[in-house]
Amino acid sequence: MHRALFVSEILVEIFVSLNQLPSSTIGWTQSSLTRKSLASLARTCKTFHELAMDLLWAYMPGLRPLFGCVTRLHPMIYDPKSKYSWSRCVDPLAEHEFHQFLRHSSRVRNIVMSTNTYIHLLAALPIETCVFPGLLSLSWMAQRTNPGDLRFFLSPTLRHCCVSELYSDLHHIGTQCAALEDFTVQGHADTAQLSEVVRSCKGLRRLHCAPLDSTAWMHLSTIPTLLEVKILASRNIRYPLDNLDFATFLNLSTLSFRGIEVEAVLALIHHFEFPSLKEFEMYARVLPWAEAEQLFRALSRCKASQTLEHINISSGSRIQGHSGDSLTAVRQFLCFKQLRTLRISAHHSIHLDNDLLFEAMTSWPHIRSLSLLDWHPSTITFRGLFTALRLCPNLYDLQVSVDVRNIDIEPEAESFQHTSLRTLVVGSSELESVNVEVVAHIIFSMLPAVDQVMRASGGVPRLWSDVNKRLEFLRNRSSSAAGRRIAGGVSDPN
């Protein structure tokens, strides 16, 4: 064996490279060839054994592979005729079998539990036994979980925990798992119980869960490591927050709400400061215009106005009318000088004109994605659009309404091209008396990276279908001409 393989750093790089997979393939789904290779390396020599075994057992799709190490259970598990329910009539592990089951459990770093079928086989294990002393990540999706099932998995080293619902075993997870950084509770949970669990966590970085009470929010504001909070309700609920004191989330960068009424979100924005907030997201089933205006105003007045880069506010339905001034509403966002993404679809329409679009782009020099759709006839013209685009060279996704009937630009006389924009979505409905060829030529000449124009409300009406067909024709003709020029240049001896 080459002496370089005795250098642990080199060996680690080789083995880790062998174990690396494409991003679309993870964990147990990795190729059998990779696992067989690691198993073969583990049997090759003592130098390879420990590292290969660590990688081989690092990820576990449940407990079945570990039970396969138990002499009594091995034939049942790996018998081709064995059924999924093989364990139902099997006695729990005896004391002399514990070491066989635990032989490799200390190597497990990531485990995904989709069923608790085999848990009863561990019934005789001493309650203080730490089955996975090195576990870093736990994903528990098992249904009908019994009290005590999770106790074997709550390792002091656990950093990431995702559960399908709030189980009684998690009551003091923050105390049992002091290293916990990421905690996700996917399903509905009692607010008081969930808040008590969250208050036991002292070093969280990310929290995804159902609504919390005021005491839990106050606790979260004291955690300096906290970076991300996402509150998700399965249905639109009224979520009162009382007795909030003023506090600061020093390092929180992401704040997201789904299914929560605006009143609760406003209470949080008014009572807390977010000096490091970069991303704000809110989805409501219905978001009336008056509440949307309150939300816009509150965001613009909080300290996060100097740091916010991504804002996404949306609702599941459009309001048929409103009495507010959408021009004034849009101006509430002009103070966000670091804005990269702004997507607003929380009401019937956001009305823009050339002047406001220009003012917005002047205020957002770093903007990369903008969605402000007006469902009424637009007053943004092509000249207003391209004048604004000159100010935002990094914009790649744009969703606005354009008055395509008003051709106020001559593409042959313009040298400007916006080469970054790739997605153009328009909100204008199908209109009569539109010059399809001129519209297509303008887009082709000045937005060369846009393959086709899409309509926000879904589907492609005849107008835009015709424009896209013309765009495809222009691109094909341009490609053919370029090919002929290249061919002519190659054959020309001069």
Image (tube, rainbow, N blue to C red):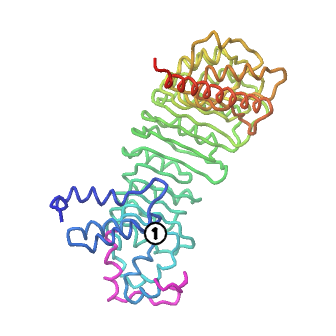
Decide whether residue 102 is among the magenta residues. yes
Quadrant position of residue 190: bottom right
Residue type marked 1: Pro
Rendered view: 426 above or below 121:
above
User: How many discs appear?
Assistant: 1
Image coordinates for residue 13, horizontal then vertical, percent = 27, 55
| Relative depth, front residue between 249 and 428 | 428
| Relative depth, front residue between 469 and 35 | 469
Can residue 175 be seen in the rendering of this structure? no
Q: Secondary structure at mark 1?
A: loop
Residue at 43% of width from left, 33% of height from top? 275
State which quarter of the image contains the N terminus.
bottom left
Image coordinates for residue 345, horizontal then vertical, percent = 67, 35
The residue under label 1 is 61
Rendered view: 98 above or below 9:
below
Quadrant position of residue 457: top right
Q: Could you tell whether 335 is left or right of 343 in the image?
A: left
What residue range appears in magenta?
78-107
- Characterize the local packing of mark 1: few (<14), some (14-19) or many (20 or more) Cα atoms within 10 angstroms: some
